[in-house]
Image (cartoon, rainbow, N blue to C red):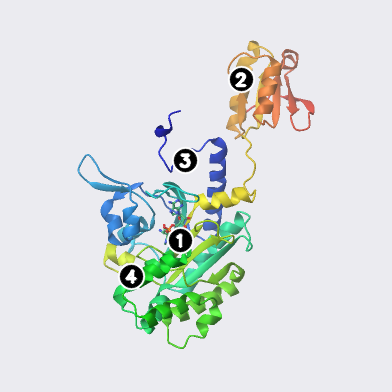
Amino acid sequence: MRRELTVRGTRDFYPDSYDRIRFLFESWRKTARSYGFEEIEAPMIETLELYRIKSGDEIVGQLYHFTDKGGRELALRPELTPTVARMIAAVQNQIAKPIKWFSIPRCMRYEKPQKGRLREFFQLNVDVVGEDSETADLEVIGVAIDSLIDLGLTEKDFVVKINNRDFVSEYFRHEGIDPAIEHGLFKVIDNAPKAPPEATEDALRKLPLSEEQRGGIESYLRLATAEDLRSLDFESAGRDSLSRLFGLLDTAGFGPYCSFDPSVVRGLDYYTGTVFEIFDRSERMRAICGGGRYNHLLREFSGQDLPACGFGMGDVVLSEILQDRGLFPPYSPPLDYYLVRISGEQLPLLLKTARVLRRRGLRVEYSYGEQNVKKQMARASKLGASKVLIFGEDEIARGRLVEKDLATGEEREVSFPRS
Ligand code: HAM
């Protein structure tokens, strides 16, 4: 096939790879529902304006956008959070809070395709809206952790790195850093773990910072544990919130999966307090998941502040990890019965029987063309059928069929299945 017919950074899902993605979706759904989240879906296309509101330059720069035949500027969704904000703004006075929604959107970002990053991917997206407490943050982080545990991963495989944007701002203000450069500074910090140290030093030098302030940022980046936070000698509401969150995470049994990390500030502009990212402990790949609190995004849509917290967990990095660890179940095409006929004469009875079994919810196949019995049996094995039903002349005359269990090779006579 000509290569250019496939869009770069997209994937075709053949039956076996689609089976793996379905396995992932089923596990995600099960966990989100176990926390009481309700599932939503929304359009793949949105107005370009929706993303200009507050996602930040990085995401806007990665948008697939176009002008439609009616002259409207539209974009393919790169994430679901602005859509969730738009949907909530439309109904927020009619529904009880907190609103707990999840979805599994297909998203598009014009990024450089690389290991763990594509242009088209799926996300588990989970949000709690209308609640501004660390308990809501705990629930959101809990769904993320339990999703990974349900897939077979353990605390040895992944870590949730947590920080609080208010704390970071308060720290920098304490160092006398101008709040006007905070946005740029957050970008440098967000990039620091992915960039060589010289690049981070260079980027810091480009910001209007004194030698002392640069030293303050370096000390900040050296903070390593929740104890380090406690020892800081200034008042910080963000730090207190972090401490409460770590306390709750410990109490709920999530402590071993979580740690404080000063470099987590998140690249999207709408985040406010708690922020977190989940990584494979080997740190060889990009984040499995990212999220946090966005208390002011809803105001952009409805004029009213409504606190919110959530995350997006992508399928690409996660699938690579599950594949690596052998955690995907082996693919077996689903088939309960393969119906085998000795000759064309048995076809009418076979068709009726197939229908009866299928209406019982069983998965049934048979050969469409005339084939000898050996070929039909070979096809049944190839398809992984559990059982074969043989339509033989003599047995049919006695009102019977032969059922063969392909796993054990056992054969027995059975009566015609009737509806
Ligand atoms: P994000 O950090 O941009 O956050 O994306 C979340 C996750 O989606 C990433 O950790 C990664 O697993 C996956 N992801 C992002 N871009 C790509 C890509 N190009 N290829 C493969 N996977 C990718 C958000 O999207 C926020 N809207 C999450 C959120 C929900 N915050 C609050 N609620």
Q: Mark 3 highlights which residue?
A: 11
Kind of residue indicated by mark 4: Lys
Instruction: Find the distance from the CA under tag 1 to the CA under tag 4.
Output: 32 Å
Instruction: Find the distance from the CA under tag 1 to the CA under tag 3.
Output: 23 Å
Q: Is mark 1 within 8 Å of ligand 1?
A: yes
Q: Is residue 417 visible?
A: no
Instruction: Find the distance from the CA under tag 3 to the CA under tag 4.
Output: 40 Å
368 vs 211: above or below: above
The mark nearer the N terminus, 1 or 4, is 4
Q: Mark 1 highlights which residue?
A: 311
Return the mark for residue 206. Answer: 4
Is disc 4 surrounded by few (<14), some (14 to 19) or many (20+) residues within 10 Å? few
Instruction: Find the distance from the CA under tag 3 to the CA under tag 2.
Output: 32 Å
Kind of residue indicated by mark 3: Arg
The mark nearer the N terminus, 3 or 2, is 3
Q: Secondary structure at mark 4?
A: loop
Residue 399: where, in percent of width, then height?
Answer: 72, 19
Residue 26: where, in percent of width, then height?
Answer: 55, 49
Residue 157: where, in percent of width, then height?
Answer: 61, 60
